[in-house]
Image (tube, coloured by chain):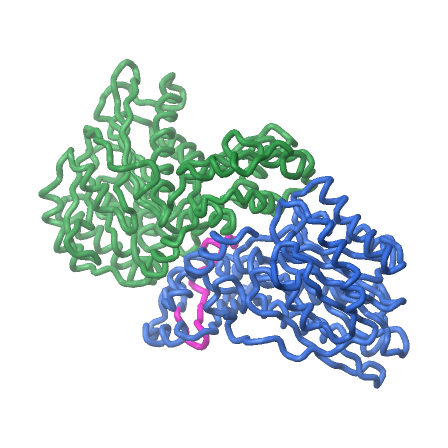
Chain colours: A blue, B green
Amino acid sequence: MPVGYRQLPPLSEIPGIRLAAVAAGIRYQGRDDLVVMELAAGSRAAAVFTRNAFCAAPVVVAREHLHRAMPRYLLINSGNANAGTGEAGLAAARDCCQALAGLAGCDAAQVLPFSTGVIGQQLPLERVRSALPAALSALSASAWAPVAEAIKTTDTVAKGVSRQLQIDGRSVTVTGIAKGAGMIRPDMATMLAYLATDAKVEAESLRACLQAAVARSFNRITVDGDTSTNDACVLVATGAAGGAEVSRAHPDYPALCEVVAQVCERLAELIVRDAEGATKFVTVEVSGGADSRECLQVAYAVAQSPLVKTALFASDPNWGRILAAVGRAGLQDLDVSRVEIFLDEVCIVHRGGVAPEYREADGQRVMDQEEIRIDIRLGRGSARERVWTSDLSHDYVRINAEYRS
Amino acid sequence: MPVGYRQLPPLSEIPGIRLAAVAAGIRYQGRDDLVVMELAAGSRAAAVFTRNAFCAAPVVVAREHLHRAMPRYLLINSGNANAGTGEAGLAAARDCCQALAGLAGCDAAQVLPFSTGVIGQQLPLERVRSALPAALSALSASAWAPVAEAIKTTDTVAKGVSRQLQIDGRSVTVTGIAKGAGMIRPDMATMLAYLATDAKVEAESLRACLQAAVARSFNRITVDGDTSTNDACVLVATGAAGGAEVSRAHPDYPALCEVVAQVCERLAELIVRDAEGATKFVTVEVSGGADSRECLQVAYAVAQSPLVKTALFASDPNWGRILAAVGRAGLQDLDVSRVEIFLDEVCIVHRGGVAPEYREADGQRVMDQEEIRIDIRLGRGSARERVWTSDLSHDYVRINAEYRS
């Protein structure tokens, strides 16, 4: 079970979006694994994709299509990543788009394909194709919850959130769903996230809004330091709420960006809470850095340290491992005598050594919690960064030794 | 048990070196945990230390002493790292040196202290002091094996090797011992290594010899990507073999450097073979890189990927995870269509996708072995690097969730 998250909350419909999940039998039996999402004509979409050089075939095709046309459909499958599949995989991704476009009466470039699951196996194209008519006839505005279920792989629970805000006095909604539990690290991960709003947003402003939101959410989490081949995050603005188009100059644009970022942050947080084998949800805060880059360097050195993560799993206040990870993060001329480290409010390291007032019982009390904050103060500047991570448990090894991702 | 290594081989004595291991009860009961190594007058010593900014008190003191005087004694304890211990820890490291110097009749700066074990607890100074007289009276030329045992922490087996070579027609010996099984990664690790030779070597040439050897051995291994606070590697040349002093210009200097490097490589290899929880010994070879730096970047991305390491543990030929790790290593403009990946001799990735002739049974056959070579060919240059690593097993998590390092 995820740390501090039990089930999908009610998700708000987004006028202009209809969606459906069906069972195509791509890899799983007895569950939905294929999703079609229809965007009303005139919708704008922005997307960010994995930076992995071996990006999957659907990522290549989605990037290409997004460049060529205004998307009308997103086509998502779980169970097969269509990655490492060479020319055949590219052809399969294109064929899926063509098949959906043929049935829906649009151009193939108006379909964006997404896949998540096992790497290196050819996509069973016929199963996708056969399931498309059923998906199209099932399209409805209310299917966010079954869609959030259908995109899961090793996720134990579906992830989503809705938020409202006012633009020009009209109420608009942002709903987002995501999947991902392993192969997670900054620069996107085995992670798919879809956000939609009924706000009407100018194209370039929509892209900027998404990029800023991803930077402070999905690019600030790590489970295992691995970046997948298939990551994608899409933000659709249907414009169905009406009103004037929102661009950067609009007074409510910052509020929209803030809500989109909050939705992304919540989804990113849920991914870490549901991390493979996770028993802890850990916030690593680094402040007092000379710049953001070095704060992140320290935060990731701690958040990705297998020794820190196994100590977290054991609820062991073994702060020496945190100190060692800070020390090896590679900061130039780090003056350790200025470094302070706290577990929640408990000061464990002061002036480079164990704090004189530190008592093991205090550290133990914090480590016994499910949610832990590691607060590192570098004492050399005013930059600050925050990263979320999980612990490294027996179940992480079991899941990844048994499952083919 | 380590992968492909059962027990310490016979180690050759080094004229000019006497050593002893005794039980001081620092942390462990019923085993030796304190070592004194005596270097004959006129011995030269070179050392490299951890680059962790939070380096341990004995590292600070050893660096200082090495700078000030010709060492006559090494004093090593296991069970307590004397790291993160602030001013009190520094005082304790100095006091130990002073105590040994007083008994042995040398200057305190001629004693180099080393500690390995739990971080953040004060060294039990009285126990060290009380055990010193027994250690000094037990000094003998033949105690290499008990000393290799005494420096162990989570190591399951003592590690050492001896090699001979000829210098100016005289036979000289290099013997090395090491400890380390976790918190291991390039730039030194929770690793102590001591090498001695009876060759007579000029000081600067000895340093260069050690640095080159460490670069191609201890700095080319990773278990968990963590660099410890206490790493040290020392090379002593007693000169007891006689003959002219060897400096860089000497015709046999390259041969000496090669043998010292081979001893370091063997010790580095044994550390990985005995890595915490290891069931596999894995060689990651990257060739065809534009330079050495990018080969190492790819090699470590693969060697430190928890997903690759859990697949290795499961003997699962899940090559997609290797491909994903190569893709996220951050190489500029990597042309994936030129990348080839082999498991031993089996080609799994060709032109960026699964090789047409690849059969799962072939990959499985390689993965079933205890020793596996992952061979990555980047196709963009002539640089080449090799890194050794282990898998990520249930036992790694168990050991590190239970043990306080």
Instruction: Please state the extent of the stretch shown in magenta in the rendering.
Output: A326-348
Q: Is residue A258 left or right of residue A326?
A: right
Q: Is residue A346 magenta?
A: yes
Between residue A86 and residue B85, name the one nearer to us: A86
Q: Residue at x 64, y 52 (%)?
A: A80
Q: Residue at x 34, y 46 (%)?
A: B191
The answer to which image quadrant residue A150 occupies is bottom right
* Residue A288 seen by the camera: no
- Across and down, in percent, residue B49 comes to 38, 45
* Residue A226 seen by the camera: yes
Q: Is residue A6 magenta?
A: no
Q: Residue at x 45, y 36 (%)?
A: B372
- Across and down, in percent, residue B354 comes to 63, 38
Q: Is residue B376 left or right of residue B277?
A: right
The answer to which image quadrant residue B130 occupies is bottom left
- Across and down, in percent, residue B290 comes to 62, 33
